[in-house]
Amino acid sequence: MIMKWIKNNWIKLLAVLSLAGAIWGNFPYVYYQLMNWIVVGAAIVTAMQASRKNNIAVMWFFLFVAVIFNPVAPLYLDQNVWRTVDMVTGLVFLLALFV
């Protein structure tokens, strides 16, 4: 049972861990680029899962997250703004792990 949970949620867990690292760490820029790819992937997977369950509001929220963290056309925000966005997004992914 736990292996099935890990199989279905590993990318969300990786997103939570990478977002936590972004909040409390001071890493080179390449870390944040990699984190953006992870978060976008996790957001798309979560949006697809929400779509399958006909949870349209959650689907649109995670598609919005994918746009915000888009590594191809990144947003350039202040570091404090990004920390807040990272914290909120990490908490939402954490919640998505258990809902």
Image: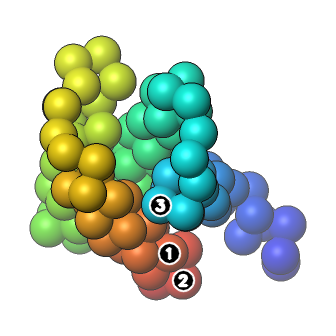
Report how far apart the C-alphas of labels 2 and 3 lie in the structure: 22 Å
Report how far apart the C-alphas of labels 1 and 2 lie in the structure: 7 Å
Q: Residue at x 34, y 24 (%)?
A: 71
Q: Are marks 2 and 3 in contact (CB under 8 Å)?
A: no
* Residue 65: x %, y % from top left: 25, 50
- Figure quadrant of residue 84: bottom left
Let me know if residue 53 appears in the view: no
Label 2, residues with CA under 10 Å away: few <14, some 14-19, many ≥20:
few
Between residue 41 and residue 4, name the one nearer to us: 41
Q: Which amino acid type is shown beneath numbered disc 3?
A: Ile
Question: At numbered mark 2, what does the secondary structure look like: helix, strand or loop?
Answer: helix
Q: Which amino acid type is shown beneath numbered disc 2?
A: Phe
Which mark is in front, 2 or 3?
3
Q: Earlier in the sequence, mark 3 or mark 1?
A: 3
Q: Which residue is mark 3?
A: 23
- Figure quadrant of residue 54: bottom left
How many labels sit on residues? Answer: 3
Report how far apart the C-alphas of labels 3 and 1 lie in the structure: 15 Å
Q: Which residue is mark 2?
A: 98
Q: Which amino acid type is shown beneath numbered disc 1?
A: Leu
Which mark is in front, 1 or 2?
1
**Horizontal side, residue 18 vs residue 39: left or right:** right
Numbered tag placed on residue 94 in the rendering: 1
Question: At numbered mark 3, what does the secondary structure look like: helix, strand or loop?
Answer: helix
Question: At numbered mark 1, what does the secondary structure look like: helix, strand or loop?
Answer: helix
**Horizontal side, residue 74 vs residue 21: left or right:** left
Between residue 97 and residue 70, name the one nearer to us: 70
Q: Are marks 1 and 2 in contact (CB under 8 Å)?
A: yes
* Residue 91: x %, y % from top left: 41, 75
* On-image quarter of the N terminus: bottom right
- Figure quadrant of residue 62: bottom left
